[in-house]
Image (cartoon, grey):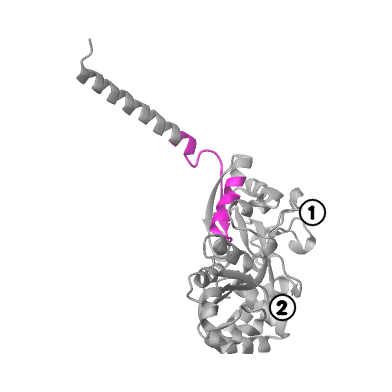
Amino acid sequence: MMTAELRRAWIRRALSVWLALLLVGVLVVGVPGRGPRLGVVCSSIEDICQQWARGFTEATGVGVDMVRMSSGQALAAVQRADGEFDVWHGGTSDLYEVARSRGLLVPYRSPASAGIPSRYRAVDDSWTGVYRGMLGFCSNQRVLRRLGVAPPDEWGDLLDPRLRGQVTLPDPRTSGTGYAMLWTMVQRAGDQEQAMQWFERLRPNVLQFTSSGMAPSGIAGRGEAAVAVTFTQHCVKAHDQGLKDLMVGYPRGLTGTETGAVAVIASARKPDLARRYVDHAVGSTAQEAGAETSSRQLPTLPGARTDPRLELPVGTRELEAVGEEAAHRRAGLVAEFVRRVRP
């Protein structure tokens, strides 16, 4: 007959074996690196980058090594051409145009992109637009009330002297959003000189130029600044994640837009898998993925679901998205901005 002590020892051994088997099962299911894997550099919001990767893996069984970088950092990574990345996903299309002009991207027109209008793709199909963004204001209502300032509804409102040190902007040197803002001001003013003068007048009100286009919303949301200039999907995300003092606003008249893109990188080690990734990225499942992560974006694919907070209101028109001309002028405009505005 088994003694009580032997029974306890037997139970301990059985429990240890069961736990070991359970752990092995988890590791076998979740072990990364089994089978083909794709390297993707992503220049959009972190959680939607991960959702895009998960969606592709679920659809194809191909694993994804996703690294999040700002658009400027991603361009530098693509330019290294060391084969680390096969696909570039997210980020403003002007930098994709720079990459295209340098031969860093491979033309590929996905069959799944047939419904996407031509204005959302490169002339040679080196990149395809997969989301749109509208430049606007992300305002902290509590801070504005304390300052006695109404939420801005035109660009000139940012020059209000009561907003001294209360505006945060993305830096055009490192941020695609920042360059979209700079290009918007050049288009709006009609020439480079007028745009630079406007930024010089705005400079005393600027608290901080951020390295990424997403950061200004967080700064405003924490009450460190009253107003952020950003693509409004970042403001909507910050609000939905708990920064309830934030509100989205759009300037009357004109505002800038972005087209976020996806492309196969010329130095890709797995070009066939990279094209499969693009096929997935341009489709409705990926373009609607933001609804599952609170990182909502306006799609380029007609008929895909949208968030009405991201649509321009009556009274605001969108300027032409940052494109080929803006890409060619980028270096000169940014250099002049740095010289005159000193971010």
Q: Which residue is mark 2?
A: 252
Please give left or right for residue 60 compared with residue 315 in the image. left
- Within 10 Å of disc 2 (Cα), the crowding (few <14, some 14-19, many 20+) is some
- Residue stretch in magenta: 27-55
Identify the image quadrant of the N terminus: top left
Measured as percent of width and height from the top left, residue 73 is found at 54, 66
Res. 93 image quadrant: bottom right
Q: Secondary structure at mark 2?
A: loop
Residue 10, horizontal then vertical, whole percent: 27, 20
Is 216 in front, or is 24?
216
On the question of residue 7 being in view, the answer is: yes
Answer above or below: position of 60 versus 176: above
Of tags 1 and 2, the one toward the viewer is 2
* Up/down of 313 relative to 23, above or below: below
Residue located 50% across and 83% down the image? 165
Image quarter of residue 333: bottom right
Kind of element beneath mark 1:
loop
Reading the image, the residue beneath label 1 is 115
Q: Using the image, determine if residue 121 lies above or below residue 292.
A: below
Residue 36 colored in magenta in the image: yes
